[in-house]
Image (cartoon, coloured by chain):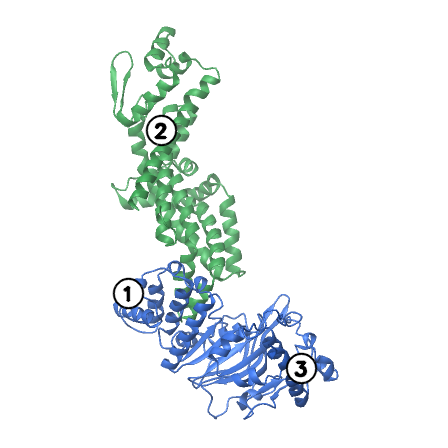
Amino acid sequence: MTGSARPAGGAPVPSDERRHGFLELRDLRIHFPTDDGLVRSVDGLSFTLERGRTLGIVGESGSGKSVTSLGILGLHKDGRARISGEIWLDGEELVSASAEHVRTLRGKKMAMIFQDPLSAMHPYYTVGAQIIEAYRIHHQVSKAVARKHAVDLLGRVGIPQPDRRVDSYPHEFSGGMRQRAMIAMALSCDPELLIADEPTTALDVTVQAQILDLMRDLQQEFDSALIVITHDLGVVAELSDDILVMYGGKCVEYGTAEDIFDRPEHPYTWGLLGSMPRLDRERTERLLPIKGSPPSLINVPSGCAFHPRCGYEPRTGGLGSTEVPELAAADGGHDGGHLVRCHLPREERRAIWENEIKPTLESA
Amino acid sequence: MVTYIIRRLIWGVVMLAIVSMITFAIFFLVPRLAGATSESLASRYVGRTATAEQVTLAAEKLGFNDPLIVQYGRFAKGIVAGADYDYGPGVERCPAPCLGYSFLTRLPVWPDLLNRIPVTMSLAAGAAIIWLLSGVGTGVISALRRGSFFDRAAMSVALAGVSLPIFFTGIVSLVLFSYGRPLAITAPGGSYTPINENPAMWAYSLILPWITLAFLYAAGYARLTRSGMLETMNEDYIRTARAKGLPERVVVVKHGLRGALTPIVTIFGLDVGLLMGGAVLTESTFSLPGLGKYSIDAIVNQDLPKVMGVVLVTAFFVVLANLLVDLLYAVVDPRVRLS
């Protein structure tokens, strides 16, 4: 994870000969020029993800999570976005690759599961037709073969009577079934990188658990790299090996799931943990929302983007509002893999977590 | 599905009956309210040279003295079963569907209409194909290149198309392409050739009316398609289609256009249905012997049976088009259940 420790303000480093991770983002920036100004949706994001691992990207709406995932898929290559940095996928650089080349990878090498499959699936085509379409665009097979493949897939994701349901329309499925069908569609070409954008947001809780189980099983079966994008820490806790916390288009904390849940160091991560409902806590106790609202991505707050909402900003001695903190190794990490972007001194962060934050989260 | 069609067909017949009542009322009840007598109505049937006694006799024989409901019953029966007309010298059999006799030519209206329908149908079908292809095509490109020069130019032309009346564009195009020396490449107005006589001449004689009429409609379709496409291309399922790795062309046509098709199908059905009743201005401008020209001539001559005939035929086509549109809905959008 040394690659991700690069300062956010640094220029993109030219690709060298060293081996890249299966998926490696280096200083990715995705900006959208608008009439109101430049929207810095993703502003210097770096991370690495290997096959068989799961990365959870967490953040509020507008933190740049979804833009990142669409950027990896090359869906911002329509000329409206300004993209810089590097995206390496299995040894290929995608930011500089042609849109047409990235298209051939899309759906085959990397696929995406969208939230709310009712609107993400075409209402006028059967579920089967949409899976068949995804398969046949990358494989020269007859319709009959593709159809059999679609039926197999629907069976694999746990849809009963797949040979009949293949001819159903999305509106004839329940929410959970639709999400399963969406997963089947994403899996149709055995993608090596699977991105799930809020995969369970539109589902009720029991179905959520089933879908999460399914995704975990399928990931192990396919040995694919999985990115789960969500604002729900519970989902991330279920699935992820590593967690990346995004705020204002930047990574503010990165670490293993244990790092983030047991030794979080960024005040924003503390806020996220505090606002997570937990069954083991007293019902009467109130959740602790993060004060304020997500930052404008046009006029990003000066210094640390989180400083207007941060209760510990005064302890930075004015640095918080003037200087953008760098993503640096945190104290709690075992191997330097735990990174945090905060001006507070390490010892102080540790102390605040141990003495002020942790007790409030654990009070039962 | 079958029960739905049957039910809709029954409703269609009911609709036609209501339309026939309204037309009947317009042509027989309204003149009465305006002061017309049985004799003044009958005088239209017997000509200007008839004596007062002849007119009275005709009024009696034509049944103008009967209660209105009886008169309507006779009119409706004529359409369904045919009617016998007693002109004094002899009884004339008017086979079903009997829409009466022209005041002017004394010929039954229905065979006249039958002769005119193919002309109108030719005009409507050709124009519909042209405007559908050009209008929808333009709308799609405009939506994809929103704000581009093409978009602005196309939408300006579309605005002109909607605004310019056919008796202007038609005459200008006739002047340019039929009578103007350098560009005279099409047949002059009024030179209609039936398709079964000579298909090439048929198309040649209709090409200018087709394009003129299509221009009027294509404009609306371009605007409708453009706004529909702008909406559907922002849908989540378009993003999904792209995420599958589909080529942009497939994304636009198979996913985008398909999603924007429903309102286009609706308007198209109704437009074609209405046009089948005659494109009055186009047919007049190009002197095409279709239903539109027929009705305008009938109105000018106050030939009521002809006007009524055209109204009923138009109503028939509109009802039919409505039914077809509703059936097409279920084909276009599987979420629509016909019941």
Q: Quadrant of residue A121?
A: bottom left
Query: Whole-percent x and y of residue B143?
Result: 49, 59
| Disc 1 to disc 2, C-alpha distance | 55 Å
Q: Quadrant of the C terminus of chain A?
A: bottom right
A21 to the left or right of B17: right
| Disc 1 to disc 3, C-alpha distance | 57 Å
Q: Quadrant of residue B213?
A: top left
Query: Whole-percent x and y of residue B70?
Result: 35, 18
Q: Secondary structure at mark 1?
A: helix
Residue at mark 1 shares a chain with residue at mark 2 = no
Disc 3 sits on a residue from what chain? A
For disc 3, the marked residue is A356
For disc 2, the marked residue is B309
Q: Secondary structure at mark 3?
A: helix
Considering only vertical position in the picture, is A144 above or below A220?
Answer: above
Residue at mark 3 shares a chain with residue at mark 2 = no
Q: Colour of chain B?
A: green
**Nearest to viewer (mark 3 / mark 2):** 3
- Which residue is located at x 38 percent, y 47 percent? B128
Amino acid type shown at disc 2: Gly
B306 to the left or right of A64: left
Q: Are marks 1 and 2 in contact (CB under 8 Å)?
A: no
Considering only vertical position in the picture, is A350 above or below A180?
Answer: below
Disc 2 sits on a residue from what chain? B
Q: Colour of chain A?
A: blue
For disc 1, the marked residue is A163
Badge 1 or badge 3: first in the primary sequence: 1
Q: Quadrant of residue B309?
A: top left
Considering only vertical position in the picture, is A85 above or below B309?
Answer: below
